[in-house]
Amino acid sequence: MTFWGHACCYIDIGGFVIVTDPVFDNDPFLRDRKIPMPPPANYANARIILISHAHDDHLSPASIATFPDSCLVLCPEPSAQYLTEIRQPVRTMKPGDSIECTAGRITAVAAHHPGTRWSLDAAADGRALGWVIETARTTIYYTGDTDLFPGIGVVGAKYAPDIVILSCSGHLEGDDAVVAARGTGAPIVIPVHWGAYGFLFVHERRVPRNSDRLRRELGSTLVTLPVGGSLPLPAEHLRH
C-alpha cells in the first residue's frame, strides 16, 4: 500500500491494484495542489477505483480519465452524475453491496458524511461510503470522510480489519479520531487526508491532523506513511 497524498492510496494485492479517491487536480475548490501528480504510467495497471463521495477533493472526473479505460469505478449513487463523461465503467453501490474480484471481495459500508458535490447535509444513508477490501490474507477498511458514528464500530466488529485507512479530516479529528480508530479494532491505523493540498499560499499539511495526540493515544498502532511511502501488506491476518 502506497500513500499518494490527501485520500489517495494505491493498494497492490498480488498485482491487482485498487486506488482510493484519486484526485490530482491542481486547484479543486479553495485548494491548491502542492505536490506533483503521479505519472499515469505508475497506475497503468489499476483495476478498480473506489470513490467515497462526490466532494471535489475526493472525486475528480479529470483524474479518473487518466486511468485505464477498463478500470472499474465504484461509487455511491450521488457520485455517478459527475462521471457520465468518463470512458471507464461506473457501478453505483449502497451499504452492504459487494463485488467479487481477483483480489477478493469489496464491500460498500456506510459513512456519516454529505454525499453530493456541494451538500453540507451529513447522513449515514449511503450517499457517502466507506469500503472494506477482503483478501485471502488481509482485510482493509477505508473509512472515507466521516463523522464519528456507530457504523465505524459495526464495521470493526463484522469485518475485523487488519488495516484501517482513517480519514482524519475536519469531520474526524482529535478524540473522535482516536475513538474511531479504537472502534475498528485494527492493529494498523494509517491516517490520511493530508499531504497534498494547501490553500493558496498556505502550504499543505505536513503531518496528519492532531498527529501528536494520535501518536500518544494509539502508540505503535498508528502507522503514518509519508507521501509516496509504502507499507507491505501483512502476509496473514493480524486480527483473529
Image (cartoon, rainbow, N blue to C red):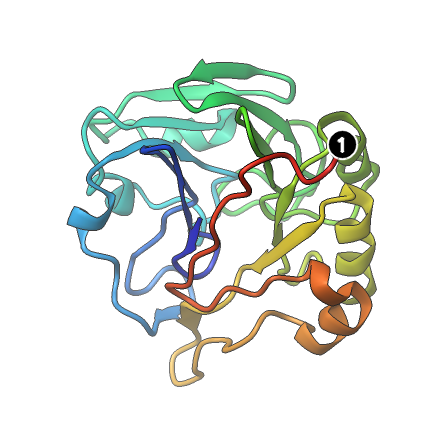
Amino acid tagged 1: His
Whether residue 152 sits left or right of residue 101 in the image: it is right
Tell whether 201 sits left or right of 234: left
Indicate the position of residue 10 as horizontal and vertical percent values: 39, 46
Residue 20 figure quarter: top left
Q: In this picture, is 178 found above or below 127? A: below
- Residue sitting at the far front: 235
Task: In the rendered view, tell whether residue 209 sits above or below residue 10.
Answer: below
Task: Residue at 51%, 47% (x, y): give it.
Answer: 118
In this view of the protein, which residue sits in the foreground, 63 or 215?
Answer: 215
Residue 201: percent from left, percent from top: 39, 85
Query: As displayed, is residue 238 above or below residue 39?
Result: above
In this view of the protein, which residue sits in the foreground, 175 or 214? Answer: 214
**Mark 1: secondary structure:** loop
Give the position of the C terminus as an image quadrant: top right
Q: Is residue 173 visible?
A: no
Residue 141 visible somewhere in the drawing: yes
Q: Position of residue 38 (x, y in %)?
A: 25, 58
How crowded pointer 1 is (Cα within 10 Å; few <14, some 14-19, many 20+) is rated as: few
**Residue that appears at 77% across and 63% down:** 218
- Residue 86 lies in what quarter of the image? top left
Q: Which residue has dot 1 on it?
A: 240
Tell me which residue sits at (43%, 27%) in the image.
74
Q: x%, y% of residue 11?
A: 42, 42
Horizontally, residue 83 falls left or right of residue 170, namely: left
